[in-house]
Each structure stands twice: as structure tokens, then as C-alpha cells.
Image (spheres, rainbow, N blue to C red):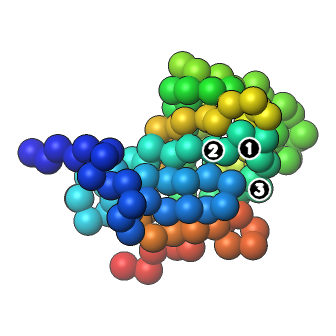
């Protein structure tokens, strides 16, 4: 049994600033769950290009609103509090937060993040070689 408090992660190496987002890494690979869990803030008014070629991600919005644009079809998916989206096809996408509100997201990754990842120039997190 483990218990992790967000307040104990803030200001540590487990709080990762990606520029347009800040990811608080609650559970990572070493926690041995087979997935990782982040509490992530997407900064108001930002657009982030993301393409998780090596991971599947589910994202549950618990605060704020914005939209996802899937780049294969240019479809716009409005996202707001209490909605989850699943990148079940490793979908390349843009994530946009509304200009007036940060979005707060619970992000689950399979395979789990090791905890230090930031996006590369293509919006990708690297494959974990272990
Ligand atoms: C929702 C999303 O993908 N944001 C980018 C950051 C990432 N989810 C993370 O590492 O928490």
C-alpha cells in the first residue's frame, strides 16, 4: 500500500515543467503498477503539440476546458471538466487550453513514465529501454 500527497511532490524533481504544462508525477514506473499517473496543469491559452508514439495515454479533465485537435483528420474535440479522452491510436494531436482557464488533467500512461520525461521536438516521450 502506498499513499502519495500532491503537496509532497510540489517543488521536487517529480514536478516537471514542460513550458505549456506542469506535470506532477504521482506514480511512476518504479511504483510497479504497470502504468503511471500524473496530475497535470495545462496552462491557459497554450497550444501543445503531442504525439505519444511509444505510449498510450488516457486524460481525465477535472478542472477547466479546452480542446484536442487530432491531426490525422483535423477533428476538434471539445474537452471540459468531467470528460476523459483516450489516445488509443497513439494519436498525434494539439492540446489547447481555453485562454481564460488552466486545465487540470489526471494522465495515465501505459507503459509507465519513468518520471523525468519531457516532450522532444515532435511532441514524443522516448521509449523506455528497460
Ligand atoms: C495532457 C497531456 O498530455 N499533457 C502533456 C503532459 C503529460 N500528460 C504529462 O507528462 O503529464
Tell me whether circle 1 and circle 3 mark residues in contact (CB < 8 Å): no
Tell me whether circle 2 and circle 1 mark residues in contact (CB < 8 Å): yes
Describe residue 71's horizontal placement relative to residue 29 as left or right. right
Closer to the eye: label 2 or 1: 2
- Mark 1 burial class by Cα count in 10 Å: few <14, some 14-19, many 20+: many
Q: Earlier in the sequence, mark 1 or mark 3?
A: 3
- Looking at this rendering, what residue extends furthest in the top direction? 82
Taking the spot 75% from the left edge, 73% from the top edge, the residue there is 121
Circle number at residue 42: 2
Q: Earlier in the sequence, mark 2 or mark 1?
A: 2
44 is higher (above) or lower (below) than 9: above
Q: Is mark 1 within 8 Å of ligand 1?
A: yes
Q: Quadrant of the C terminus?
A: bottom left
Quickly name the residue at label 1.
Answer: 95
Describe residue 97's horizontal placement relative to residue 53 as left or right. right
* Rendered location of residue 64, percent (x, y): 63, 27
* Rendered location of residue 83, percent (x, y): 58, 22
- Looking at this rendering, what residue extends furthest in the bottom direction? 129
Closer to the eye: label 2 or 3: 2
Describe residue 116's horizontal placement relative to residue 42 as left or right. left
Q: Is mark 2 within 8 Å of ligand 1?
A: yes
Separation of residues labelled 2 and 3 (CA atoms):
12 Å
Quickly name the residue at label 3.
Answer: 49
Amino acid at each position: 500500500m502506498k499513499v502519495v500527497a500532491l503537496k509532497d511532490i510540489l517543488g521536487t524533481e517529480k514536478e516537471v515543467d514542460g513550458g505549456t504544462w506542469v506535470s506532477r508525477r504521482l506514480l511512476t514506473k518504479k511504483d510497479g503498477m504497470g502504468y503511471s499517473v500524473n496530475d497535470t496543469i495545462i496552462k491557459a491559452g497554450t497550444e501543445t503539440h503531442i504525439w505519444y508514439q511509444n505510449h498510450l495515454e488516457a486524460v481525465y479533465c477535472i478542472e477547466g476546458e479546452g480542446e484536442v485537435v487530432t491531426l490525422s483528420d483535423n477533428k476538434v474535440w471539445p474537452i471540459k471538466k468531467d470528460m476523459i479522452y483516450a489516445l488509443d491510436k497513439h494519436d498525434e494531436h494539439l492540446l489547447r487550453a481555453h485562454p481564460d482557464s488552466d486545465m487540470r488533467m489526471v494522465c495515465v500512461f501505459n507503459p509507465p513514465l519513468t518520471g523525468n520525461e519531457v516532450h522532444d521536438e515532435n511532441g514524443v516521450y522516448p521509449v523506455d529501454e528497460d
